[in-house]
Structure formats: structure tokens, C-alpha cells
Image: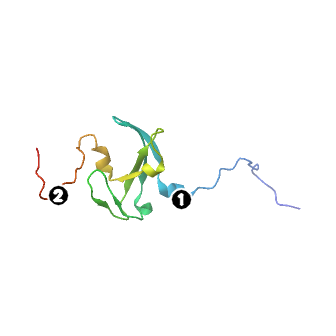
Amino acid sequence: MSPRRNHPKRDDEPPPLDLERIKRGVGAVQAWSDGEWQVRNIPAGAAVKAYRCPGCDQEIAPGVPHLVAWPADERGDLTDRRHWHAGCWRARDRRTPNIQRSRGAPRYG
């Protein structure tokens, strides 16, 4: 004789959690003046490589939380992903492009 069940058997059990997907962060589409961007937060535990932030041209060290963004429409693909400091991403409409000049070049402005 088998033991008695006090609860009905559920056929629709939820799938197990994907830990890698949780580590990668949650993505969202953000609309900016230059189009829509797919943006994903990268938590500190998932940040394992060093990247160069295009907003401030400084290195994002491993273990530092940041975000990754790429065009959400058909203009680009995953090779267009760029890793940003969160503050640099939020301030990118207020900043001018970071133009690299040599030390001897004249500064205008």
C-alpha cells in the first residue's frame, strides 16, 4: 500500500530557475533621443572582465556593477554591445563625445 496524499498532484510545476540568467541581469528597452536601446544591468557577481566605458573612457574593473547596452531595433546586433558605468549611461545626453587628442593638439573651446 502506498502512503496517502493530502494534496493533489500538480502537473504544471514551474520550471527550475536558470542561475546564469539571473546572474546576467534583467534587460529592458529604453528610448533615448538617438533611438531605442536594449539595456541590461550587470551585477557585481557577474562582472568578471574589464571593459572600457565609452562615456568616460575609463576602465570598468571586474567585480564592478555596470550595464550593457546595444541598439534595440534592426540597426545593430550583439556585436554592438557596449559596457557603461550606470552614471555615464544616464548622463550620455548631457555629455559631448569624448574626443581623444594628442598633447600637442590645440584645444578649441
Please, what is the three-letter code of the amino acid marked with disc 1? Glu
Which residue corresponds to mark 1? 20
Q: Secondary structure at mark 2?
A: loop
Looking at the picture, how far across and down is residue 79, in whole percent? Answer: 45, 51
Which residue corresponds to mark 2? 102
Looking at the picture, how far across and down is residue 50, in whole percent? Answer: 36, 63
Q: Secondary structure at mark 1?
A: helix
Q: Quadrant of residue 103?
A: bottom left
Picture residue at 41% right of the left edge, 57% below the top = 43
Which callout, 1 or 2, points at the residue further toward the start of the chain? 1
62 vs 99, left or right, is: right
Q: Quadrant of residue 35?
A: top left
Pick whichever, 107 or 38, lies toward us: 107
**Colouring rule applied to residues:** rainbow
58 vs 28, left or right, is: left
Looking at the picture, how far across and down is residue 74, in whole percent? Answer: 48, 39
Q: How many marks?
A: 2
Answer above or below: position of 49 versus 86: below
